[in-house]
Image (cartoon, rainbow, N blue to C red):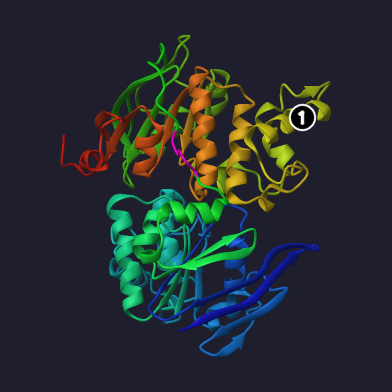
Amino acid sequence: MSLELRGVHKDYGGVGVLHGVDLVGRPGEVLAVVGANGAGKSTLIKILAGAEPMSAGEMWLDGVRIEPRSPHDAHAHGIRTVHQELSLVPELSVTENLLMGNFPRRAGLIDWAAAHRRAAELLNSIGFGAIDPRTTAGRLTVARQQMVEIAKALVDQPRVLVLDEPSAVLAGSDLDSLFALVRRLTSAGVLVVYVSHRLAEVLDLADSIVVIKDGRVVGTTTPAATREDELIRMMAGRRLTQIYPDRRAEPGPPLLTVTGLGRPGEFTNVSFTLRAGEIVGLFGLVGSGRSELARCVFGAEPAATGQVRVADGGGDFRSPAEAIAAGLALVTEDRKRTGLVLGLTVRDNIGLTTLRRGTRLGLIDRARQRADVTTMVDRLGIAPQRCASMPVWQLSGGNQQKAVLAKWLLVGPRVLILDEPTRGVDMATRVEIYRMVDELARSGLGVLLISSDLTEVLGAADRVLVMRQGRLTGELPADGTTEDEVLAYAIGERV
């Protein structure tokens, strides 16, 4: 099914976000859309999904002009969208999320056995068969929730599938399954609109690439006619000469020591040390237990065995509040659900972790809060510059991530745990985050960087810990180690 946008504009309150966007996608093609955070990609996706109307312009589908006014309208035209931010109902099972409104029935009642079979068949057919359809969606890792989101979009066999950052939390065989699925869909004649900041996979998957900057199309090309550095130049408006900072000097004394930590069903006998001035990468495939480990170290989940100790002798935290008091901070992998309060302003979100010290006589000291937030907005380059009074949901993904980082940096941590800190973040913003993390390490912080991006782990960290099925299987120096070597530990080829 051919899809064409002609001169699409979108304004919010008189402020232009999209300025005459044109693009064409054809059946059986992967049309990639790339751009920096704030370029207008999310707005474009919402228009395709029927979640936002165009202010001006036209949308054509197989030669017929359409104007979806709701997601239901878009579905009726065969357009399904998998958004970057998850939309599953966490209290319901995978089966219920997949088949909602379309359950098989017997004698007027839902036939649950048939429903679970149908869900399992769908998951198997697209390469995600490792997911148990009876599992409550909220108990799945973010990566597996992402897989369920994709499966949910395929229930009605769409003719146009829009994927917004589908690989942001996937790695290894899960990433291979996604790519194989995209290729099967295009072989069947589906148009896949693929939005991603991972430019290497865009160059591998796409048939054509549209680059958006400041709400305008600044280039349309093909993988054969461009390179990754050229795409970055078009997106950022400048060349990025160095992505990762130079290596740091020898680290200092231990700040965090984890010994024999275990939690049934999640991880077993995990031990490692994080030193002052050091960035340690933690890599593992979906289900390896890396995010669960981070939550346990931070006191958000209780450990069954082992110890967590910090430099002054404290540890074994029974709550995040105890961990924060000891100098730990955790940037979670899901910024929308556990990192931000979307209904609050940027100022109130950044000030959440320091409310207690920022009160006088039981009232929030707004003057101090404004000063702290202004300092962090300037330090991290959060855009727009006068964003403090804006609802945080109005920021782009990259700027939301900076707001989460700002919230924790105000605490003044000694140990910073970053779980997927660049998920859904463009390359220019990634470079800023890498630079900032490097500066923090050089100032004496210890940083635990959890990521499903192998290039990031090896480029930003000093050494790499590898997890597989809840166990640490390797500890490698980042300098001189290849991605294949790390993957070998992650999939069990080395023990």
* Residue 188 picture location, percent across and down: 33, 80
- Give the overall secondary structure of the magenta segment: loop
Task: Please name the residue shown 29% across and 58% down the image.
Answer: 176
Q: Does 44 sit left or right of 242 as displayed? A: right
Which residue sits furthest bottom? 64
Taking the image as drawn, is residue 17 in sight?
yes
- Residue lying furthest top in this view? 312
The quarter of the picture where residue 51 lies is bottom right
Residue 378 belongs to magenta span: no
Would residue 482 be found to the left or right of residue 203 on screen? left
Is residue 30 found left or right of 13 in the rendered image?
A: left
Compare residues 245 and 352 and report the one nearer the observer: 245
**Residue 445 seen:** no
The span shown in magenta is 240-244
Secondary element type, mark 1? helix
Q: Is residue 493 above or below residue 439?
A: below
In the rendered image, residue 442, in percent from the top left (x then y), is placed at 49, 20
Query: Which quadrant holds the N terminus?
Result: bottom left
Which residue lies at the image location 57% right of the left edge and 84% below the top edge? 60
Which residue is label 1 attached to?
369
The vertical placement of 454 against 263, above or below, is below
